[in-house]
Image (spheres, grey):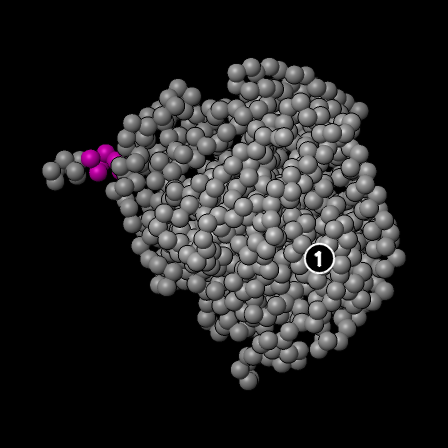
Amino acid sequence: MTRSSEMLHVTVQRGTAQDPRKQRFDVPARENQTVLDVVSWIQQEVDPTLSYRFACRVGMCGSCAMMVNGVPRWTCRTHVSRVAESGQLDIAPLRNLPVIKDLATDMDPFFDKWVAAEGRHHPTRGRLEEFDPIKPDDPNRVEANLGIECINCGICYAACDTVAGNPDYLGPAALQRAWTLLNDSRDADRSGILAAVSGKGGCHNCHSMGSCAQYCPNGLNPMRAIAGLKRETVKAALRWKRDA
Amino acid sequence: MTHLDRHDTDILIIGTGGAGLFAALHAQQSAPAGTRITIAVKGLIGKCGCTRMVQGGYNVALGGGDSVERHFMDTIKGGKWLPNQDMAWKLCEQAVVRIHELENEIGCFFDRNADGTLHQKAFAGQTADRTVHKGDLTGIEIISRLMEQVLARPVEKLQEHRAIGLIPTRDGSALAGVLFIDMRTGGFRLVRAKTVLMATGGGPTMYKYNTPSGDKTMDGLAMALRAGLELRDMEMVQFHPTGLLAGDHTRMTGTVLEEGLRGAGGQLLNGAENRFMFDYDPKGERATRDVVSRAIYAEMRKNNTSVNGGVFISMAHLGPENVRAKFPGMVKRCADSGFDLAGGLVEVVPTAHYFMGGVVVDPDTRTAMEGLYVAGEDAGGAHGSNRLGGNGVANSTVYGGVAGDVMGADIRTMGALRDPCPNALQAEIDRALHPLTRQPAPVHPLRVALQEAMWDDVGVMRTATGMERGLTRVAEISEALMNVGVAGDNLSFNLTWHDWLNLRSLCDVSKAITLAGLARENSRGAHYREDFPDEGDLDASYYTVITQAGCDLNVRRDPVQFTIIRPGETILPENEPETLVAAQ
């Protein structure tokens, strides 16, 4: 634990994608201090022009995700003492997304891909019908539940080298959402989902490097979900061939 | 003349919490083909705001002995007879439809019993197992599913657009549009619409300790005040008893440690590590939120406090492994922040959580201003003086949907877009540009000063003397703010400019809260007067209404209309048990 008399030596990426530059700040170390607190202190006390984004403060919205010492993290839930080796912090905008200014990125490409992966429920029932009586130990439901706690923070998307190399790749979060829906017996568009994830930017781009699972703050495993999609898309293609 | 971008639409929705997203979906279903729908939000769609932060769940009567009538009675009694009864009834009745819509159409999956039926639990103040949930992260499931439905639809999206002014027509008879700042560019954008839903969420962040999302600063209610609308129940600020206390310098401070910890047997200890709740209430730690908040506050005033000036919550006697298994999310969150919830002591403090007050609306979400609709935490009336845990997200989703339906129908009879009053428009632009005309100085110290003033003088326990002092302090801070400038050389994503505007909204609404608090000379629900500790005559219940005229705020008391039931009566059938929940 850093003592209160100590200073953190913080490097922050400033500017837009066209002219990024690094700026140094010395920030007093405190006992209970997250990386978001460090960024906020700089804006409130030293440099009112620093831009960043946060909302919930407690790891429920993912708005404050940034690169911290080269690793994508929720800054609101990252205690400085866990990451600031010898008091050094390097903070940059989330990787693989366009920078708006300083530490704030444009998350639209991430969500556009969520939509492109058919990442939404396709209803089989209406509001005037009963609930589907799905038992909690139903195997499909158990599989669907594995990915359900995704908060769409974009950490896995930033961690993924395949996304970095292929801007069309849908990425781990969107594909994991598709896998969850595919296992949800209430969803009406199984074939639409499979079509959406088997195209050019789809699941077969994944090289199973596993950064998504390594860095997910919620301990989810998108790589496993993508492996499931690969199996199902191949099976569907074979079926399609056979029936043709 | 400042540059102004313009955008025209038919239906404009401000906010993307439960109310805003449901309004977008329902407007699309009810409006004629070709209707343009625009949704604008201060942050990112579905990410900012508070619906996402809902832990507990969604109150809805789904049979098994429970009924809409019982839910209604709990809501009225919980609100200490102040709710607008027609709104409370519609909330309870329509929650049944909305929860089915959330599961069946939106794709939420709520926790099940072994037989596949929905699992329901009881929060404090409920007489039935009523709260539908998804673990203790219900809000994430609801908002993520709603968000992806809206993202996939042809709705125009204005993200990181903060609303700064409701612009009426020249004669003031109707709303013409809403002025925004595009926060990414720093430019102004006027959006004209035939109907506008204001669903920005309340969020009492003018208190030293508060739970809401960081973007929440009561902008909606501040705009409503300036537009001359009536606001009701403005004194009603709900404090959650157990906010994390980790020091003034961290944004972690104030965030909620969930209710369930106390329900499961968690103990509150003062600075000397002694239990104290039984000194205040026979239910001990299991007393309702308002009672526990006041007890902790009383201990704090006696200086029986922890290092950072609060009290401790202790779970370890329940077995650290049990605690870890039962509250994995809370334990992990505390651990990430450096605290051992399962085995150690964690400092807590009462924290401003929810705002019951809001714009006066009818049960169709219409306001006194043609073209303006209000739903969710921005609307007053449904909860009265106190909101039951689980009624917040039910309220926002029910009334957001209602607003979408009603706006979709109303635009059929509306003609062309209305022309905005140029003077009102210019006044709002000038107001926002004001700090750029003053010498730059730090904004944050004034925010801290306001939060201290409201916490000390208009907080958990109130007196006339305290609130009068609070009024003076708020006025001084408000005035000081007008002389604090922000450097205007780059307005793109300029958080400090928005901090200034946030504080402007908070000062304006703080004044309204304080005046309404002075006007209520009794203690009901969240509002506790040490100088008027009794609840007063229930039959003569009144609610406060506040309006702004020029620079002045006028407060009056209106009698509660008992349109469905009077105090002392019940609409439950004869011989119905008082509660269906087994005593713990």
- Label 1 neighbour load within 10 Å: few <14, some 14-19, many 20+: many
Residue under the image location 26 percent in, 37 percent down = A195
Quadrant of image for the C terminus of chain A: top left
Q: Residue B88's spot in the image, x, y percent?
A: 57, 67
Q: Position of residue B318 (x, y in %)?
A: 64, 54
Q: Is residue B518 visible?
A: yes
Callout 1, which amino acid?
Thr
The quadrant of the picture occupied by the N terminus of chain A is top right
| Quarter assignment of residue A148 | top left
- The answer for which chain carries disc 1 is B
Give the labeled residue for mark 1: B547
The quadrant where residue A225 appears: top left
* Residue for point 35% across, 63% down: A129
Residue at the (42%, 45%) spot, across then down = B36
Taking depth in this image into account, of A211 and B202 the one nearest to the observer is B202
- Which span of residues is magenta-colored? A232-237
